[in-house]
Image: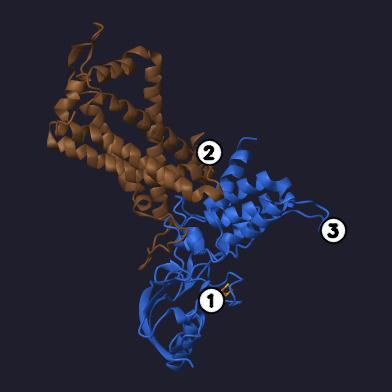
Chain colours: A blue, B brown
Amino acid sequence: MSHSMRIHLKVWRQAGPNAPGRFESYTVENANEHMSFLELLDVLNEQLIKEGKEPVEFDHDCREGICGSCGVVVDGVAHGPQPRTAVCQLHMRHYKSGDTITVEPWRAKAFPAIRDLVVDRSAFDRIMAAGGYVSVSTGNAPDANAIPISKVDADLAMDYASCIGCGACVAACPNASASLFTAAKISHLAKLPQGSPERKMRVRNMVEQMRKEGFGDCSNHAECEAVCPKGISISAIALMRREYLKAATS
Amino acid sequence: MLSRLYGSPVLKKVTTGLTGIFLTLFVLVHMTGNLAYFADDTGEAYNAYSHFLTHELGALFYLIEIGLLAIFLLHATIGIQIWLGKRAARPEAYAVYRTAGGASRQSLSSRSMIVTGVLLAVWTVFHLVTFKYGTYYETTLADGTVVRDIARLVDEVFGNPMYAFGYPAMMLLLAVHLRHGVWSALQSLGLVRPTASASTYLVGGLLGLAIGVGFLLLPIAIYFQWA
Ligand code: FES
């Protein structure tokens, strides 16, 4: 038995990259607690289309918290109030009828606005292109177990590799720093033997690209860890700094 | 060298952390030295300590002074630049913003580093003018050496309620600055172990509090004539 919920939304609307943005207020009368937050936006959009208005643009793909496409700031918190949850996995059962929810896009100079809640996160792609890879010769795939790796390192590498690149760390950081994203990618490969040959070049180039993109400096607020849908620890940032110092001093 | 420093977000943090740790060690030694005032000897130990620092260390004293000045300026400059950079990195502010709690270390202390930092920097200049470059009284130690009577100046200054309460207020700001600062410096140097993050944060906060309280005892005790 699901009860109908009335949800008020204050949504950031912006017609284009350089258009001025503003909040618009909407009410969704027929929401219910089984809906995800993105489904609530779907219902709002159906409503808007019926009224002949422009639907609210927002990014999404898998809707199961694994692709990193979705991401909006819900009542001041990136991905909303549920810890370790991408906004596509936030459900309306955490709200009650009559609630008002404010929805904003990620805000950072390095994530330029595209439209409504959609921002351009290609800065992350360029950071990845600067070194977030390992070079592998073509040919037959090597035996997966041929290179020994300790369980501890494998687990840590997996923790860092769980980054889905959604950008919540940047959105939540008071300085709009991309340190957690960049550090997760660097640390993931730093923990693996396959990442070792290119480690110095990787940390130098990725940090440099992060700076070029116009992200802010880290102030160790650790807000990034708190909003990361994968709960990636800022110990990745500490590891990135050690990697950087090793690369700089050798 | 400076361009290399500013060209790297990591080196900037490492430098802020290193200079911050030096400054923390300095205030810790300074605070401990101040406690000599509480010796029951009408300022003798305090004056002797001050004389030792300024006259018996020789060239080392000037080296330390210049070093401290350089460290102080570097720490302040990078701090201000990080603050300016943060404004540039988010030109449009959120209408609604709050911390998610949990793992976040965001606090009044972490958000106000620029405010406490700038206030402390300005205050440091006043502090030097008041004491280092303040009235030069002389006194004779028990062993016959003529030394500066800094204890007398300290008594005079903290007899004035503006100083007696203004100083403790500034020292509380220092404690607030160090609450985030100590932990942050260690994290910036990559020294915080993942398993010890919470305890490092706690110890950093307690150290900040101890330094702040250690300093503010002196003016309060003098004003109320406890010592
Ligand atoms: S839509 Fe894929 S993570 Fe949310």
Pick the front one: A137 or B31: B31
- Could you say whether the residue bearing mark 3 is in a helix, strand or loop? loop
Judging by the rendered image, the residue that carries numbered circle 2 is B4
C-alpha distance separating marks 1 and 3: 37 Å
Q: Amino acid at mark 1?
A: Cys
Pick the front one: B84 or B79: B79
- Going from the N terminus, do you reach mark 1 or mark 3 first? 1
- Mark linked to residue B16: none
C-alpha distance separating marks 1 and 2: 42 Å
Question: x, y (%) of residue A71?
Answer: 51, 71
Pick the front one: A118 or B105: B105
Find the residue positioned furthest to the right: A140
In this picture, is A143 found above or below A6? above
- Residue at 58% over, 78% down: A63
C-alpha distance separating marks 3 and 2: 42 Å
- Residue at 47% over, 82% down: A41
The quarter of the picture where the C terminus of chain A appears is top right
- Residues indicated by labels 1 and 2 sit on the same polypeptide chain: no
Query: Disc 2: which chain?
Result: B
Judging by the rendered image, the residue that carries numbered circle 1 is A88
Does the beta carbon of the residue at mark 1 sit less than 8 Å from ligand 1? yes
Question: x, y (%) of residue A113?
Answer: 47, 68
- Residue at 53% over, 71% down: A86
Q: Amino acid at mark 3?
A: Asp
Query: Disc 3: which chain?
Result: A
* Residue A111 visible in the snapshot: no
Judging by the rendered image, the residue that carries numbered circle 3 is A143
Query: Quadrant for ligand 1?
Result: bottom right
Q: Amino acid at mark 2?
A: Arg
